[in-house]
Amino acid sequence: MELVTRTTDVRQLHPFFVGEVTGTDLRALDEHGIDEIRSMMDRYAVLVVREQPFADAEQVEFARRLGGGEIVTKVGRSVIDHAARLTEPGMTDISNLDENQQIIARDDRRRMYSLGNRLWHTDSSFQNPIARYSMLSAKEVPSAGGETEYADMRAAYDALPAALKAEIEELRAFHSIIYSRSTIGFTDFSDAERAQFPGAEQPLVRVHPGSGRTSVYLASHASHVIGWPVPEGRILLRELMALATLPQFVYRRTWRTGDFVIWDNRCTMHRGLPFDEATQRRDLRRVTTVDVAPTAVRV
Ligand code: OGA
Ligand code: MN
């Protein structure tokens, strides 16, 4: 399908979601152009914009304009990485590189922590307010592997059997990054780090204020269902995760240098795929905005 807007051209890359924008420099958009990007985000949930030569500070500035709110700072590797390769405030390092631009060792704690990004998740679901938009800029990409997959939680909700929709309608789940990391055997958090991440309750079903669409709201951070016995809730969450990430709801992005991808954390999940980290460099840089106006729960 083809849609033409005033400043940009958009092509839909997946039957349910993901728009690809060409012919625009996001740094040069006026307020109307930024509004157009917001409407495209409401519709496509993920936007791929090719050939964006953002400097780090420009990427943070773009996020500030788009999100209208604060930039999330204590997320991703920066939580545990005190060496900080990237110095721009608000920039999260999603690379496999250290402060000397060298590939991080296989058993480095920063790598262990970052491996959590291989699990399906949505950013900052373990915090309140959650993340609204995350945006990744691809500076260096592996020659094979290291793709990012996105799942459309609106389409997943639409496809749920009516009885399951009714069952989860009022439920809330507890999200914790300490929990999600523990499922892959990363338990090496200090008391101070644990104290930073008490976790958060989130509704299992949300209505997106921009599109009016209903979505499941899931992540590997979701530990249990509030008010349910833990094993019972965890089984339900696993079943929902499996349904929400069926191949028909998933788009896989093979990165090219210069790609800029924006996703809406309120209605999509994502995960990174493996690559040969011993020999390949992958330098992606992320900025994330806070969901300033709380996402509406079912009205
Ligand atoms: C992120 C993330 C996955 C990847 O940037 O938030 O989860 O493919 N990235 O690196
Ligand atoms: Mn993420």
Image: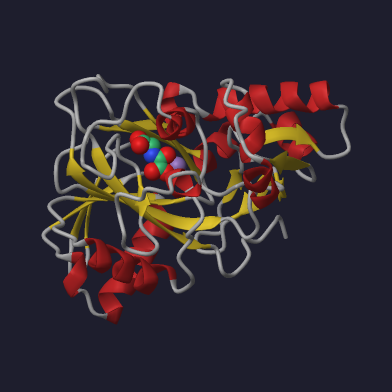
Percent x, y of residue 150: 40, 36
Instruction: Find residue 275 and report its horizontal and vertical position in percent.
Output: 27, 21
Q: Is 160 rendered above or below residue 68?
A: above
201 to the left or right of 116? right
Quarter holding ligand 2: top left
**Left or right of residue 225: residue 106:** left
The front one of 95 and 134 is: 95
What residue is drawn where x is 19% and y is 26%? Answer: 280
Please indicate whether residue 196 sits to the left or right of residue 232 in the image.
Answer: left
In which quadrant is the C terminus drawn? Answer: bottom right
Give residue 17's quadrant in the image. Answer: top left
Q: Is residue 130 left or right of residue 75?
A: right
For the residue pair 26 and 221, the one nearer the viewer reads as 221
Q: For the view shown, which residue lies furthest in the bottom direction?
A: 31
Image quadrant for the N terminus? top left
Location of residue 272 with respect to 226 vertically, above or below: above
Residue 278: quarter of image: top left
Q: Residue at x 74, y 41 (%)?
A: 174
Tell me the quarter of the picture where residue 227 sits: top right
